[in-house]
Image (cartoon, rainbow, N blue to C red):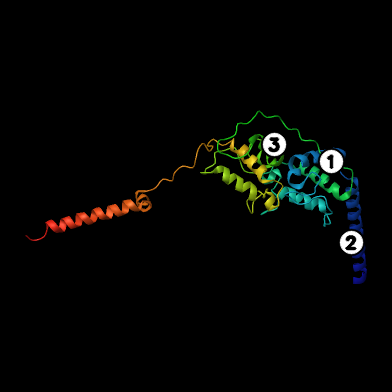
Amino acid sequence: MSSRSCFHYFGLALWIVLVLWAAGYVRANAQGPTQDQLELGARLYAENCAVCHGPNGEGRVGATLAKDWPSIRPNLRVKATIENGVPGSPMPAWSQKNGGPLNDEEIEALVAFILSWETGGLRPPLPTPVVSPRSPITPVPNVQGDPNRGAVLYAENCAVCHGPNGEGRIGATLSKAWPSIRPDLRIKATIANGVPGSPMPAWSQERGGPLSEEDINDLVAFIMTWSSAPITGPLPEPTLTPIERLRSSPGIVIGGLALVLVIVIGIIWYSRPR
């Protein structure tokens, strides 16, 4: 058999393999997600994604998802992003194998729901969140803001990452004692400005987020009710060392020098020859 014939048969075999692969790919994708899968994806999206990406995928503090994805296999791209997150950005890893809360089936359902915006298929509506009533919250003394309004804002914006009771989820634990002289100011700055290079985005309107200064103050007031060391009075006076006390009191320094000078003069006077 000539080399030309071998090349001909090799090309024919390769063409058949490609046709079969393409047919299988089209058939697999033509099936599409089931209604149950889309409904699961809608619920998971409402519970985990809408707070950052918006209820309709329009973007909020996270990227826009309701768009055409420039990829041959957008499902794989979206799946990998959900599973692994985007290092150095506010997008954390959501898969259980990477420390997140979602299993493989849940991630597949989320991918199917998110891509329904691109395909234009029928999507189930997002479920309405159920807000559990809370008892009236007593404000922490000397902390600005309304903790009762802050509790509602926390449930809408923070609980998905930090847990409904501040216990932490894919975000930091907030129900704790804050090692700071003014923990309220530290918490406020973190909410307003975010933490660059971490999954904590900036939430203040000045930084492109959705929350006003009043919103942030109310959030801080609510989060501070978890702290076991609330602010109960004015800032404590700083503790000074003896040397620092001398430096901060010029009168004491001058008096001390004068006393030393008198002692030296006395010693010289009494030790002179008679």
Q: Residue, x 63% and y 37% (percent of image)?
A: 222
Q: Which of marks 2 and 1 is nearer the N terminus?
A: 2
Is residue 96 visible in the rendered image? The answer is yes
Is residue 170 visible in the rendered image? The answer is no
**Badge 3: few (under 14), some or many (20 or more) residues near its Cα, within 10 Å?**
some
Mark in the foreground, 1 or 3: 3
Q: What residue does disc 1 label?
A: 38
Q: What residue type is labelled 1?
A: Leu
Residue 61 x %, y %:
72, 49
**Badge 2: few (under 14), some or many (20 or more) residues near its Cα, within 10 Å?**
few
Residue 4 x %, y %:
92, 71
Q: Is mark 1 on a helix, strand or loop?
A: helix
Foreground residue among 179 and 272? 272
Q: What residue does disc 2 label?
A: 14
Q: Which amino acid does label 3 sit on?
A: Val
- Disc 3 to disc 2, C-alpha distance: 61 Å
Foreground residue among 272 and 149? 272
Q: What residue does disc 3 label?
A: 152
Q: Earlier in the sequence, mark 3 or mark 2?
A: 2
Q: Residue, x 72% and y 39% (percent of image)?
A: 156
Foreground residue among 207 and 101? 207
